[in-house]
Image: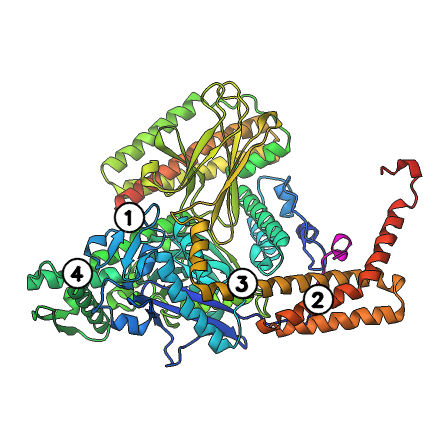
């Protein structure tokens, strides 16, 4: 492509194409997918008209994988192979999962992230999550009638780097192009803010199935600026179920339940919790495997008392976020409730009391995150109507390096607006030292051992110098997804050695690639999509270049028939691009080639003209050949 | 002034995007280089720049442009952070003036006062007295406001960079005290 060297990239000749982009709320208990259609965000339903997809995956011995309602209904029968609330294990080690002992799974400790032993073999939480995402992708493609160009996937604001990276990998595994990872409370704020045309300081209180997030935002004419975020990535609606579960064990003197019974009793506990939103008293009754009958009456008052400590626990992150944002509680103009768990009446009352105002609940707390994500996806895909929306989000946890004595030196403090970069200089402590190792950590504690280790890397090739003379600059860059990359470089004596790491959590790129190719059909599909995307990019690039070149000196270098012939090819290719059909890969390539060929004479003349321009006015001897 | 600076980095989709020059944050945000800046003007200018340069605006563009958007948006965030806080804004002005570090030693009176602050915080923390910590926080806030006034006078009225550098140095102590009070309050929460 001769044009690329001489033409400035401009805008494509293709009339604006509507790209299919969706927002996915990959939740602990439920997942949803939403999209913007004719200007409004809506949640996409399955064939039975249900919008929620339970985040439950069941593996069968014959290799069959069930996801959703069916899997959830089978959870009690086959607890070992039915993975519920997998989000709690994303990017986590066994030690991070406090309730591991009471769960019916066979966990296997692996570096960085746990694995689960099932009849389908050892699985990572990433693979399990990918099954949920695949179902959502399929639902979206069926109801939108085409291949997805990309998705915005939401994560709890308080997710650390490992949890975010794991989520992105799961999407990759499901064949989804991730446009952006978006924090759940921010997504909710978008849906609310745009819906109610709000301005000012808003708090989003998001209690999901397994995570709690609190974000404080300033809304100003389409700009959503997160001022602070805080939370607890191990506190959610599930814990309220567990409270009832433990209460049942206690009053009924049940001990040593098997996994089937545990699962069943947990389900009964959840249902009782949900019933108490509408009823003052509810009955829990079921039969356990050994024939033991469970019968109990639970009143709202007892439930409230049992779970009050959990609610109280949410307010400590709220206070911290307010403090970080430098705000008083009175300055908050509205509180938005997100997540199914915020339906609980005593929680609503407690939030209202804390903020001195009734929380906003006019959007469905289950759907609001997916809706916000869909709006953001639409904007990122470049579709019409997204130009006036801008999100300025923050990182939830400080990022730092280990220094001498196991202390943590913060490089980027929590609540820094992303994208951001910060550099810090370090030096050698021994004469002639030529290598240095670094540990990258995330967290608020002073001691490295109490923070999360994200990566370990070594910088080699430092020129030998006396101790303290070398200057090693370590740069942290956090991108708009909140993902970190780190590079280090020795700066004295002009010798540069450079290393860049992406923090890992136990899954290497090679492992992810291995998982990708494991599913042949998936890999085939991916390959086809990738080829198509490449061809589209190529076509767009050629269109841009040709158009710009034509505008620049087409009139002066081309005859009228030549000019018309090239424009004909431009229109043909632009039209082809607009169809965006994956089966048309060959014709897209042909069309691109045809345009390329038709411009070869023009490209040659432009090259001559530019050489001529460069040479004119110069003495021949001044030209360095 | 503000309009001009924003226009200078306005990115037209028809031109190749350029890396933002980050040598002078005041210029980047279209502000006159002084300590007492118009905070609302800064915020407005910040949002306008990010509206143009944020990676979200380039999500469907090629890799080079996405990379540039990441770099530019990072620079704008960095500048915003630097100008928003008093201490770093003052430091920016001192650096812009080309003032070289000489003697920024802290007075013994200042250090004594620091010791007292620290003891008071420690005492309140030990006796788990949230109200006392809140009161210390308010007192500190008041002190910081006074300090900002002194800094403004040194930089904007007297161009006394020696004094300004010392005030900036002292500011770091106040920031540290504020962190300590916050940490103590968070500690009481648990």
Looking at the image, residue A50 sits to the left or right of residue A391; the answer is left
Cα gap from disc 2 to disc 3, whole angstroms = 20 Å
* Disc assigned to residue B61: none
Q: Secondary structure at mark 4?
A: helix
On whether residue B67 falls in the magenta region, the answer is: no
Q: Main secondary structure of the magenta part?
A: loop
Q: At 62% from the left edge and 59% from the top edge, which residue is drawn? A: B61
Q: Is residue A2 magenta?
A: yes
**Which sits earlier in the primary sequence, circle 4 or circle 2?**
4
Is disc 4 surrounded by few (<14), some (14 to 19) or many (20+) residues within 10 Å? Answer: some
| Residue on which the image places disc 2 | A592
Is A148 situated above or below A517? below
Tell me which numbered mark, 1 or 4, is placed earlier along the sequence: 1
Q: Secondary structure at mark 2?
A: helix
Which residue is denoted by mark 4 in the rendering? Answer: A306
Q: Earlier in the sequence, mark 2 or mark 1?
A: 1
Q: Are marks 1 and 4 in contact (CB under 8 Å)?
A: no
Please tell me which residue is depicted at 37% across the width and 81% down the height of the picture.
Answer: A48
The answer for how far apart the CA atoms under marks 3 and 4 are is 53 Å
């Amino acid at each position: 492509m001769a044009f690329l060297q001489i033409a400035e990239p401009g805008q494509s000749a293709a009339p604006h194409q509507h790209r299919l982009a969706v927002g996915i709320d990959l939740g602990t208990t439920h997942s949803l997918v939403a999209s913007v259609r004719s200007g409004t965000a809506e949640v996409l339903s399955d064939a039975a008209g249900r919008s929620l997809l339970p985040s439950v995956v069941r593996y069968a011995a014959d290799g069959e994988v069930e996801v959703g309602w069916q899997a959830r209904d089978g959870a009690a029968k086959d607890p070992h192979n039915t993975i519920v609330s997998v989000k709690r294990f994303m990017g986590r080690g066994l030690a991070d999962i406090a309730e591991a002992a009471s769960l019916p799974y066979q966990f296997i400790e692996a570096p960085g992230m746990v694995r689960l032993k099932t009849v389908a073999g050892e699985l990572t939480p990433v693979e399990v999550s990918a099954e949920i995402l695949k179902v959502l992708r399929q639902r979206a493609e069926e109801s939108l009638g085409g291949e997805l160009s990309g998705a915005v996937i939401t994560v709890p604001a308080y997710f650390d780097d490992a949890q975010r990276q794991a989520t992105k990998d799961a999407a990759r595994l499901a064949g989804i192009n991730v446009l952006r990872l978006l924090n759940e409370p921010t997504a909710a704020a978008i849906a609310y803010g745009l819906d109610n045309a709000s301005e000012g300081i808003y708090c989003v209180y998001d209690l999901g199935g397994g995570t709690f997030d609190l974000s404080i935002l300033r809304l100003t004419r389409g700009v959503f600026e997160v001022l602070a975020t805080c939370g607890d990535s191990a506190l959610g609606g599930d814990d309220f179920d567990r409270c009832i579960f433990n209460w049942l064990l206690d009053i009924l003197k049940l001990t040593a339940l098997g996994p089937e019974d545990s699962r069943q009793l947990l389900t009964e506990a959840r249902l009782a919790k949900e019933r108490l939103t509408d009823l003052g008293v509810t009955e829990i009754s079921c039969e356990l495997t050994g024939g033991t009958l469970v019968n109990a009456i639970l009143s709202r008052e007892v439930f409230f008392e049992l779970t009050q400590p959990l609610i109280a626990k949410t307010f400590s992150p709220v206070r911290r976020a307010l403090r970080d944002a430098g705000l008083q509680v009175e300055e908050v103009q509205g509180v938005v409730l997100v997540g199914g768990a915020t339906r609980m009446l005593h929680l609503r009352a407690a939030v209202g009391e804390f903020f001195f105002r009734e929380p906003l609940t006019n959007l469905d707390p289950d759907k609001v995150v997916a809706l916000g994500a869909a709006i953001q996806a639409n904007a990122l895909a470049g579709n019409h109507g997204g130009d006036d929306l801008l999100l300025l989000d923050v990182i939830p946890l400080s990022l730092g390096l280990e220094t001498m004595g196991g202390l943590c030196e913060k490089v980027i403090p929590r609540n820094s607006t992303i994208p951001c970069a910060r550099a810090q200089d370090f030096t050698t402590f021994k004469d002639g030292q030529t290598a240095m190792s670094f540990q990258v950590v995330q967290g608020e504690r002073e001691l490295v051992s109490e923070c999360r280790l994200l990566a370990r890397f070594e910088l080699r090739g430092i020129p030998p110098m006396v101790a303290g003379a070398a200057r090693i600059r370590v740069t942290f860059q956090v991108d708009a997804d909140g993902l970190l990359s780190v590079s280090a470089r020795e700066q004295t004596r002009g010798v540069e050695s450079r290393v860049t790491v992406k923090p890992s959590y136990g899954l290497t790129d090679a492992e992810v690639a291995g998982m990708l190719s494991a599913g042949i059909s998936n890999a085939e599909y991916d390959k086809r999509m990738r080829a198509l995307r490449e061809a589209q990019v190529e076509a767009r690039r050629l269109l841009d270049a040709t158009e710009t070149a034509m505008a620049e000196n087409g009139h002066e270098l081309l005859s009228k028939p030549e000019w018309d012939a090239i424009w004909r090819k431009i229109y043909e290719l632009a039209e082809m691009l607009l169809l965006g059909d994956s089966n048309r890969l060959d014709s897209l390539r042909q069309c691109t080639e045809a345009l390329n060929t038709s411009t070869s004479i023009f490209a040659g003349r432009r090259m001559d003209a530019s050489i001529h321009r460069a040479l004119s006015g110069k003495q021949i001897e001044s030209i360095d050949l | 002034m503000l309009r001009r600076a924003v226009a200078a980095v306005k990115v037209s989709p028809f031109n190749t995007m350029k890396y933002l020059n980050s040598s002078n944050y005041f210029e980047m945000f279209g502000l006159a280089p002084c300590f007492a800046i118009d905070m609302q003007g800064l915020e407005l200018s910040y949002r306008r720049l990010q509206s143009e340069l944020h990676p979200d605006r380039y999500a469907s563009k090629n890799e080079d442009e996405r990379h540039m958007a990441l770099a530019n948006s990072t620079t704008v965030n960095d500048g915003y952070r630097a100008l928003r806080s008093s201490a770093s804004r003052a430091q920016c002005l001192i650096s812009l003036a080309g003032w070289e570090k000489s003697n920024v030693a802290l007075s013994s009176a200042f250090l004594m006062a620091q010791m007292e602050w620290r003891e008071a915080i420690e005492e309140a923390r030990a006796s788990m007295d949230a109200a006392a910590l809140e009161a210390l926080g308010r007192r500190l806030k008041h002190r910081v406001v006074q300090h900002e006034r002194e800094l403004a006078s040194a930089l904007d009225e007297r161009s006394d960079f020696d004094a300004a550098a010392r005030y900036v140095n002292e500011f770091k102590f106040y920031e540290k005290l504020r962190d300590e009070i916050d940490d103590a309050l968070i500690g009481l929460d648990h």
